[in-house]
């Protein structure tokens, strides 16, 4: 049904598109209504779609979305997640007039840290707004550069256990080592404490003789040792918990840390007073158990999350910070002005957007567009910053904005990452009610007992028992242990979980958005079909074509070489979104090579003499005959006829989104090699599973046949074609007004969309920027593993709820018993440990899909 409507929409677009004079007059300031990029002098418009657009792809996306919904409600998008680009006061940071800074923050412990850091930053004069993300240990600050220097920003939010620094200057492993040191030292002293309890104290509690007899002096020495060791555990190992409790109070958002800290500090304080007063029972063991169990359970959770900003920081370091002037002088990027002429040599990254004024070269745009097939660029053509010149020097005139497309993509991703909601664990959500309730019950119980004549020690002990028995360990472990089971199950399936939010969001997904290249296709140019005439064998055609193409650097040439008989197995290239025609393979001028051996890897390498390369093909003398390989028109230009028999394979290749490569010699074109990015073998099975109960949308920068072939694929509901990189994230954002959205992609141009989606899944063969933005990475590049990701996430989500349900059921029984005085802190600690053990056992069970 949607395929038909999409095709009708395309037809309507062709007939209804118009550009009026008023739109053209505003071209200098107009921005695309979908992606906010500047529109061309004559903006793309249509009578049935409101707004002006930078390209046909943006217009088609807007039309398709309007057909399903009314105009997008921005508030509906923002209501789906707290902190999605707004600060603590609810303001949209993108609308603030200031400079952006992204800082990595060490020491973020829970979701309440987000609110605390935002409030702390916004108290400073010169800070216009801030938004933090516990999920990625990042804070985004919008500031007034006239009042604050960028170097001063880290100091504004450092303190209280937090350390902020430039996003690329943080040693992420250092924080991990610190957490491990806290746990190991705490475990050592914890064993020392429990040895004293087992040998001396526990026997006396039950009226038995201690294993080792001791008198008053020995008992005082023993109590002092236990007190000292427990102090190390509480205030060193438990420091993150205590700080988290403090932060929750400052932020006004009670969390599980507050309950854990209350139990640990309460039992510690009671025992310290008991030592001073000479009382018999000490409950330092409760403090030790609470701190160590919670610390160990959350360590793995943090280890999973710690990976979240690593690859993005690595990519940030790859951004160009210098440029070479035409004179050859290298200057900082900040010193480059609009209109300056820059020299970019082969293999170098283009520093800024601009226009070629001298030279012609093939440019690799894969990092910013996802299309790794180099595109021939000549004087007058626009170049994007972040692309790579592959084979010839060019001179670039810097554009009016003096900015880089790569910088914009990376900045957009950092912006999305820093504004993503933190890990809002269900336990933390419930804690906003549960924690105050438990504390209130403990205080009320103590107060009532004192008012009814109970002794202060009895009243305090029962109140403390209420807090201890409330099972903070089981609640604290319910989520991280279930997540650990989910991560393990995912790893066995070849899925790396990069953000635990996936276990909460993935089961709710309504729309799955699939990038085409590298996701639905293999992302790798390969020979798909060979058609020959005049009785020429396919192997012979490939052998001759491979010999000539082995001297070319073009990805299509690599695919032909790989398919040639005796070729090495390492040919081919990465992703490409083909437009149906061969792109430039080299220089526009004809280049002659005196000869040489082919690079096919065969022991019987074929010698190629008089090699020539132009922008549409290559040729060389093989075994005494000049072999021509390239665009069919290139063969015709070289005097080779193309028979009517080959016209059909040429048309079929283009209709299928493939590139027809003509090969000929001795005055005739002898065959057509169809090169393209083929669909994955598991595509049909994967789409069948993904489309069950979900809407499936294909999103691609391709247009024409390369995109249209997916409109008829079963399981695909919509195809958005010709969408530029900057518009992909906005498209996903608008789709979120219709439901929870998952994005699956692999290219750098997909990264902002992956980060903007509720769930981002990257194919393992993708770029670093894509895998950084994702919540999960498919290591084996298996499309069916995407569906498995949803199944595992659903099973883990159920496991979390089971654990929490048990913890709360336990509390529903244990807390009334504690209030009634039927438990003491020791039995409360044992009951708490038993409840935690059940949570651990449940989490350790195999995570079956039918659970």
Image (spheres, grey):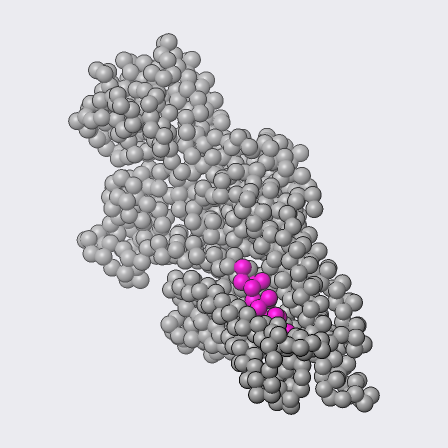
Q: Does residue 830 appear anywhere in the picture?
A: yes
Q: 591 and 6: which one is in front?
A: 591
Q: Residue at x 79, y 72 (%)?
A: 817
Number of numbered discs on residues:
0
Q: Please indicate, yes or no, whether residue 399 appears anywhere in the rendered image.
A: no
Q: In this view, does 369 lie to the left or right of 800?
A: left
Q: Position of residue 333 (x, y in %)?
A: 30, 59
Q: Where is residue 509 drawn, in percent x and y?
A: 64, 48
Q: Which residue lies most toward the left here?
A: 594
Seen from the viewer's position, the closer of residues 510 and 17 is: 510
Q: Is residue 687 above or below residue 354?
A: above
| Most frequent secondary structure within the magenta stretch | helix
Q: Residue furthest right?
A: 452
Place residue 611 in its image quadrant: top left
Residue drawn at x 22%, y 22% is 607
Q: Is residue 740 above or below residue 454?
A: above
What's drawn in magenta, residue-wise? Answer: 284-300
The correct choice, above or below, for 479 with respect to 277 in the image is above
* Residue 810 image-quadrant placement: bottom right
Residue at horizontal 67 percent and vertical 34 percent from the top: 1
Is residue 733 covered in magenta?
no
Q: Where is residue 532 in the image (x, y as percent from the top left)?
A: 39, 15
Identify the residue shown where x is 60% and y is 85%: 215
Residue farthest toward the top in the current orientation of the protein = 535
Q: Is residue 179 left or right of residue 83?
A: left
Q: Where is residue 198 in the image (x, y as percent from the top left)?
A: 62, 72
Q: Nearer the viewer, residue 262 or 12?
A: 262
Q: Using the image as rendered, state which of residue 136 and residue 829 is in the foreground.
A: 829
């Amino acid at each position: 049904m949607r395929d038909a409507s999409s095709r009708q929409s395309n037809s309507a677009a062709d007939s209804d598109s118009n550009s009026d004079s008023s739109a053209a007059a505003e071209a200098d300031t107009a921005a695309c209504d979908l992606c906010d990029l500047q529109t061309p002098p004559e903006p793309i418009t249509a009578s049935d779609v409101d707004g002006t657009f930078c390209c046909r792809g943006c217009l088609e996306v807007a039309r398709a979305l309007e057909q399903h919904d009314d105009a997008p409600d921005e508030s509906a998008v923002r209501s789906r997640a707290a902190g999605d680009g707004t600060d603590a006061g609810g303001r949209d940071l993108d609308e603030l007039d200031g400079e952006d800074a992204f800082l990595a923050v060490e020491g973020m412990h829970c979701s309440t840290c987000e609110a605390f850091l935002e409030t702390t930053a916004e108290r400073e004069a010169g800070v216009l707004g801030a938004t933090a993300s516990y999920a990625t240990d990042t804070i985004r600050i919008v500031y007034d550069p006239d009042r604050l220097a960028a170097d001063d920003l880290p100091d504004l939010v450092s303190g209280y256990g937090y350390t902020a620094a430039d996003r690329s200057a943080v040693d992420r492993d250092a924080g991990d080592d610190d957490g491990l040191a806290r746990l190991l030292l705490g475990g050592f002293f914890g064993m020392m404490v429990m040895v004293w309890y087992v040998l001396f104290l526990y026997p006396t509690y039950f009226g038995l003789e201690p294993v080792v007899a001791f008198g008053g002096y020995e008992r005082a020495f023993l109590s002092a040792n236990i007190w000292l060791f427990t102090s190390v555990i509480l205030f060193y190992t438990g420091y993150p918990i205590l700080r988290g409790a403090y932060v929750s109070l400052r932020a006004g958002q009670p969390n599980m840390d507050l309950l854990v800290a209350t139990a640990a500090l309460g039992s510690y304080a009671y025992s310290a007073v008991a030592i001073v007063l000479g009382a018999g029972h000490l409950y330092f063991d409760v403090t030790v158990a609470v701190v160590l169990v919670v610390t160990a359970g959350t360590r793995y959770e943090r280890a999973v999350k710690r990976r979240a900003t690593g690859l993005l920081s690595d990519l940030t370091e790859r951004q160009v910070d210098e440029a070479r002037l035409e004179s050859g002088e290298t200057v900082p990027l900040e010193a480059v002005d609009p209109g300056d002429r820059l020299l970019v040599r082969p293999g170098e990254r283009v520093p800024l957007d601009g226009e070629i004024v001298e030279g012609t070269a093939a440019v690799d745009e894969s990092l910013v567009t996802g299309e790794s097939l180099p595109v021939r660029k000549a004087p007058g053509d626009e170049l994007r910053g972040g692309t790579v010149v592959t084979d010839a020097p060019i001179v670039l005139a810097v554009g009016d904005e003096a900015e880089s497309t790569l910088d914009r993509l990376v900045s957009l991703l950092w912006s999305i990452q820093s504004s993503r909601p933190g890990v809002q664990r269900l336990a933390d959500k419930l804690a906003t009610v549960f924690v105050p309730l438990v504390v209130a019950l403990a205080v009320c119980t103590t107060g009532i007992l004192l008012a009814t004549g109970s002794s202060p020690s009895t009243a305090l002990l029962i109140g403390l028992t209420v807090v201890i028995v409330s099972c903070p360990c089981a609640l604290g472990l319910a989520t991280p242990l279930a997540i650990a089971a989910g991560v393990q199950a995912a790893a066995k399936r070849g899925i790396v979980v990069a953000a635990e939010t996936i276990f909460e969001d993935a089961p709710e997904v309504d729309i799955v958005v699939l990038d085409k290249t590298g996701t639905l296709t293999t992302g790798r140019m390969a020979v798909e079909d060979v058609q020959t005439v005049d009785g020429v064998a396919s192997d012979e055609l490939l052998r001759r074509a491979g010999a000539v193409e082995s001297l070319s650097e073009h990805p299509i040439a690599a695919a032909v070489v790989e398919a040639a008989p005796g070729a090495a197995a390492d040919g081919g290239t990465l992703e490409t979104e083909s437009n149906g025609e061969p792109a430039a393979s080299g220089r526009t001028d004809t280049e002659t090579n005196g000869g040489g051996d082919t690079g096919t890897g065969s022991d019987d390498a074929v010698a190629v003499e008089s090699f020539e390369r132009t922008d549409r093909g290559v040729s060389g003398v093989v075994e005494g005959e000049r072999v021509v390989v390239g665009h069919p028109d290139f063969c015709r230009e070289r005097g080779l006829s193309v028979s009517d028999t080959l016209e059909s394979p040429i048309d079929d290749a283009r209709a299928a989104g493939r590139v027809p490569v003509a090969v000929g010699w001795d005055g005739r074109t002898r065959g057509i090699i169809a090169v393209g990015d083929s669909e994955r073998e598991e595509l049909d099975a994967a789409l069948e599973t993904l489309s069950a109960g979900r809407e499936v949308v294909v999103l691609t920068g391709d247009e024409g046949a390369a995109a249209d072939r997916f409109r008829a694929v079963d399981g695909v509901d919509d195809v958005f074609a010709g969408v530029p990189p900057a518009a992909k994230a906005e498209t996903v954002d608008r789709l979120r007004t219709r439901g929870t959205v998952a994005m699956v992609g692999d290219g750098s141009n997909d990264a902002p969309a992956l980060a903007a989606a509720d769930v981002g899944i990257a194919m393992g063969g993708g770029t670093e920027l894509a895998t950084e933005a994702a919540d999960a990475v498919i290591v084996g590049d298996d499309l069916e593993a995407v569906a498995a990701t949803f199944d595992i996430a659903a099973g883990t989500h159920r496991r979390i709820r089971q654990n929490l349900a048990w913890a709360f059921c336990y509390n529903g029984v244990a807390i009334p018993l504690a209030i009634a005085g039927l438990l003491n802190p020791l039995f409360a600690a044992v009951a708490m440990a038993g409840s935690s053990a059940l949570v651990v056992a449940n989490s350790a069970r195999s995570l079956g899909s039918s659970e």
